[in-house]
Image (cartoon, rainbow, N blue to C red):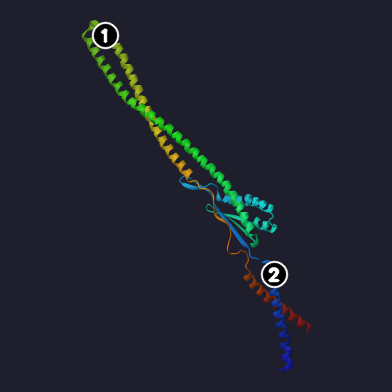
Amino acid sequence: MTEKAAIAVLGPLASFRTAFVGVAGITFILLAAAIFAFVQPRSLVRSAIEIGAFFSDKKEEPVESPDLLAKRIQAVYVPAALMTLSRSGAPQSTLGALQNSSADSIGQTVSIQSTVDPAAAEDAKAFQQKIIDQIVEEEGKRMDLMREAAAARSVLLKQTSDAVDQQIASHEKMLDRLAGLVPAAESSLRDREVERGTVLQRAATQPDRGDKTSANIEGLRREIAAHLELLATLSEDRAQSTRDLTGLRARHDTLAFALFEAQIAARTIKNTRVTLAPEVMPQPVGARRLPLLFIAAVASILIAFGAIAFLHSFAVRRS
């Protein structure tokens, strides 16, 4: 190959290489500048609260559904906190970012997340603190009402239980009296029956005293009938008092258990509490620059190849 031929071949190659490096470098610089200008690290501000709970049916129940509270945060508390922050002069960009705050529930815990520029992190913390304070205040009032209701129920159950205790004592005294009256009535009935038998025997041996004997017999018959009626009444009263006493004792046991549960419920009521105060998470969020720079480098090479191909095609057509 002659010197002129070598120059003819290598000259365009050198110019294409220069053009390739130049296009790739300029493209990468422009893309990198755009990445550094528009892709900024974002801060994640997070907080969490544990919903208050109470004891019911041998298990702990939240005072409010965590899922419903999470929805209410986004529908009610976020707009209210944004209005307060807006009146304090927060930038519109910050308000727009905070408007997209989210709330999630995990068990009895509800967490709040806000993604903002690092410069707006303090505003985001104040925003979430406002929401948390409002929730804790409202839930605290609800828990106070629950404690008052539990205390009132305990007092009512105690008063009812005391009244039942008095009724039980009264029925026990009545049964004690009946326990003494029934044997006495039975003994008196036996005496009247013995006396009636004696009078009947006497009337059989002394017929001349018929009118007087008949009067005595009639009087004894009436006494025996009255004693039988009294004994039947006492037996029925004793049976009824026994049934009433059994029912009262069963009711007393039910009231005692209900009172125990009410006292346990009053003591186990837990307030809504903050488990994580608003804090900026240590790791930034959003798109990272390093992967984007790698993509920009690859794109720059591909664009440079495209440019060289275009220049080569153009040069061929010109020649």
Quadrant containing the C terminus is: bottom right
Tell me if 274 is positioned left or right of 79 in this view: left
Nearer the observer, 152 or 110:
152
Q: Tag 1: residue type?
A: Thr
Q: Quadrant of residue 41?
A: bottom right
* SS class, disc 2: helix
Q: Residues within 10 Å of mark 2 (few under 14, many from 20)?
A: few
Q: Position of residue 289 (x, y in %)?
A: 63, 69
Tell me if 23 is positioned left or right of 176 in this view: right
Q: Looking at the image, which residue sits at the far top?
A: 208
Residue at 33% in and 27% down: 176
Q: How many marks?
A: 2
Q: Position of residue 145 (x, y in %)?
A: 54, 42
When the figure is inspected, residue 103 is found, relative to residue 160, above or below; the finding is below
Residue to which mark 2 is pinned: 34
Residue at 30% in and 14% down: 221
Nearer the observer, 2 or 241:
241
Quadrant containing the N terminus is: bottom right
Q: Position of residue 203 (x, y in %)?
A: 23, 9
Residue at 28% in and 21% down: 187
Nearer the observer, 259 or 67:
259
When the figure is inspected, residue 95 is found, relative to residue 205, above or below; the finding is below
Q: Residues within 10 Å of mark 1 (few under 14, many from 20)?
A: some
* SS class, disc 1: helix
Tell me if 221 is positioned left or right of 153 in this view: left
When the figure is inspected, residue 156 is found, relative to residue 182, above or below; the finding is below
Residue to which mark 1 is pinned: 213
For the residues marked 2 and 1, what is the alpha-carbon distance in whole angstroms? 136 Å
